[in-house]
Amino acid sequence: MNANDRPLGQPTATYESVFMKACRRESVPHTPVWFMRQAGRSLPEYRKVREGIPMLESCMRPELVAEITLQPVRRHNVDAAIYFSDIVVPLKAIGVDLDIKPGVGPVVENPIRSRADLAQLRDLTPEDVSYITEAIGLLTAELGETPLIGFAGAPFTLASYLVEGGPSRNHEHTKALMYGDPQLWADLLDRLAEITATFLKVQIEAGASAVQLFDSWVGALAPADYRRSVMPASTKVFQAVEGYGVPRIHFGVGTGELLGLLGEAGADVVGVDWRVPLDEAARRVGPGKALQGNLDPAVLFSSTEAVETKTQEVLDAAAGLEGHIFNLGHGVLPSTDPDALTRLVEYVHTRTAR
Ligand code: CP3
């Protein structure tokens, strides 16, 4: 690879970092580690700086965003930072009336259930989220060679909040729309794909080294429905950012039966939850993709010895992979002991040193 292959003047040290190499399935000195939700309530320094500031407001303050993003990097020695934001930020930015309620999650005032409701979704422009460009500028100056992962919610997961009006166990309104009015559903997902693509482009152009598309709740679907009703929109998002040459990670929870399709949608790295061992996940995904995962976040509540045993199981299952990025199978749980996370990073780095 020569320097001209690096996207957007990314520093050589970042491009050659362990995390970026693993995404490209190149050989690495040790397995890289980062954690979904590594920034957040597990850290006392996070709770301190967030005091009295509502979640969505904190996402719009560049200095605060930079500080919160850096906290877990300083503390845990992880191999990548993830930009501090939320999947509903682009929706808020285009004027959708929503809020993030503590302990609940995103709540939408006027759920989208008819064609007229679609009017809530105008195009996103980079100016709508100028605080992101500013925050990423601050971050890349501070991060040195540590790559910054940008992210967005995938069209299905965003649609599930917009259609239900909030978090949902069974996604009944979402599925009613998907099965009952396929054309409106397709139009909704296509609008969300456009918004999501712009949101990711802003982050990449500001300096994000990789992007992750969170389709957290898509495990609620059977493969045939995913392929027909969701995959076209997620594929559109991945295609829109393909030209930048940054690694694209695709993750969802409970997606054992969808892993092959998550890769096929256009990912370079497929995120796996804890329900499928990584060697089996590799068979389902097929060659040419790296895998990310997959320690059960609840394991961190057990003894250090048990955490090490379960971590070693993950590393053993990953031994034959082309590229492995160690992560949890879903986000850090808020009451996790942060020292357990620091020890976990150290354990993976030591055990995989080559
Ligand atoms: O470190 C990181 O990973 C970056 C931070 C991040 C947040 N949200 C911050 C946040 C990321 C990557 C997200 C993405 C996100 N948001 C997803 C996809 C990832 C996943 O977990 O599957 C989803 C589904 C959401 C929607 C959402 N936002 C939920 C379900 C919640 C939790 C509600 C609660 O209070 O328990 C949020 C709020 C949220 N997003 C918090 C944080 C740190 C908690 C709010 C707070 O700290 O006050």
Image (spheres, helix red, strand yellow):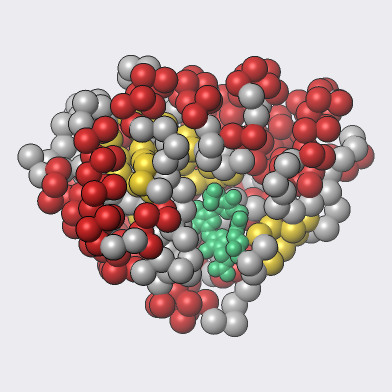
> Relative to 35, does residue 204 appear above or below in the rendering?
above
Counting labels gives 0
> Relative to 239, does residue 300 appear above or below in the rendering?
below
Is 138 in front, or is 39? Answer: 39
Q: Does residue 40 appear to the left or right of 187 in the view shown?
A: left
Is 175 in front, or is 301? Answer: 301
Is 8 in front, or is 21? Answer: 21
Which residue is located at x 42 percent, y 45 percent?
329
> Would residue 284 be visible to someone looking at this image?
yes
Residue 58: image quadrant is: bottom right
Q: Position of residue 129 (x, y in %)?
A: 60, 55
Ligand 1 - quadrant of the structure image: bottom right
Q: Residue furthest left?
A: 354
Which residue is located at x 40 percent, y 48 percent?
296
Q: Position of residue 187 (x, y in %)?
A: 78, 28
- Location of the C terminus (image quadrant): top left
Q: Does residue 346 appear to the left or right of 94 in the view shown?
A: left
Q: Does residue 257 appear to the left or right of 128 in the view shown?
A: left
- Location of the N terminus (image quadrant): top left
> Would residue 63 be visible to someone looking at this image?
no
Q: Position of residue 92 (x, y in %)?
A: 70, 56
Which residue is located at x 66 percent, y 60 percent?
105
Which residue is located at x 31 percent, y 27 percent?
279
Residue 113: image quadrant is: top right
Q: Does residue 180 appear to the left or right of 134 in the view shown?
A: right
> Relative to 18, does residue 340 appear above or below in the rendering?
below
Q: Position of residue 254 (x, y in %)?
A: 53, 37
